[in-house]
Image (cartoon, coloured by chain):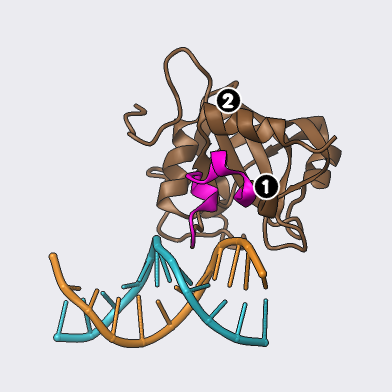
Chain colours: A brown, B cyan, C orange
Amino acid sequence: MAKSKSSSRSKTHKGYWLLKSEPSSFSIDDLKKAKKQTTSWDGVRNYQARNYLREMKVGDLAFFYHSSCPVPGIVGIVEIIHEGYPDPSAFLVNSPYYDPKSHPENPRWYMVDVQLRETFPAVLPLTALKGNPELKNMILNRPGNRLSVMPVTPKEWQSILKMKPL
DNA sequence: GCCAACGTTGGC
DNA sequence: GCCAACGTTGGC
């Protein structure tokens, strides 16, 4: 699998990602309070994002990003603890994520399981990320970007870690 | 609440 | 397969 040119993975290094969530829907505090501080990253209904979910491997790390909120930005780090598998919310008629075109015998949408690894002491705001020239090519910083799941290069990952609020 | 930037849908 | 209309995302 994983033939994508855009993958941030190599054979010897773990992959890095960024996952967006609207805190009014699911925040890092919700994850902190969750059983085993673990959640299924369900509800992704975009093919590009879906493809990235399927590239993820156990042990990969991802920034947890809060979007559509007063201060959008990175609020913590999670680890992928279960690789991509069919998203059952697509099969539930009463779910907001229901998709009648996804069938259990041929699932259209996938999710991963993630576990909280680190909560930043303060949000690392998008404005700061946009201000760092090392991150000017980040997918997140591209105008009009709407992807909710995206790869992060190892260099970008390190640059962002250095910006972490104390 | 506005609006730009996309992705999706459906008629043809 | 084109493309206009529509819906959604998400910063501001």
Of pointers 2 and 1, the one earlier in the residue sequence: 2
The chain ID associated with circle 1 is: A
Spatial CA distance of label 2 from label 1 is: 16 Å
Q: Which mark is residue A60?
A: 2
Question: Residue A83: x and y, percent?
Answer: 53, 28
Residue that appears at 44% across and 32% down: A55
The chain ID associated with circle 2 is: A
Secondary structure beneath label 2 = loop
Q: Nearer the viewer, residue A92 or A87?
A: A87
Residue that appears at 54% across and 49% down: A140
The amino acid marked with disc number 1 is Tyr
Q: Which mark is residue A154?
A: none
State the image quarter where residue A162 is shown.
top right
Q: Which residues are magenta?
A: A130-143
The reply to whether label 2 and label 1 mark residues of one chain is: yes
Name the front one of labels 2 and 1. Answer: 1
The amino acid marked with disc number 2 is Asp
Q: Quadrant of the N terminus of chain A?
A: top left
Question: Is residue A53 visible to us here?
Answer: yes
Question: Residue B4: x and y, percent?
Answer: 47, 74
Q: Total marks drawn?
A: 2
Q: Specify the farthest residue to the front.
A: A133
Q: Specify the farthest residue to the top.
A: A12
Secondary structure beneath label 1 = strand
On whether residue A26 falls in the magenta region, the answer is no
From the viewer's perspective, tell me whether residue A100 is left or right of residue A126: left
What residue would you read off at disc 1?
A65
Question: Residue A48: x and y, percent?
Answer: 41, 48
Residue that appears at 46% across and 39% down: A52
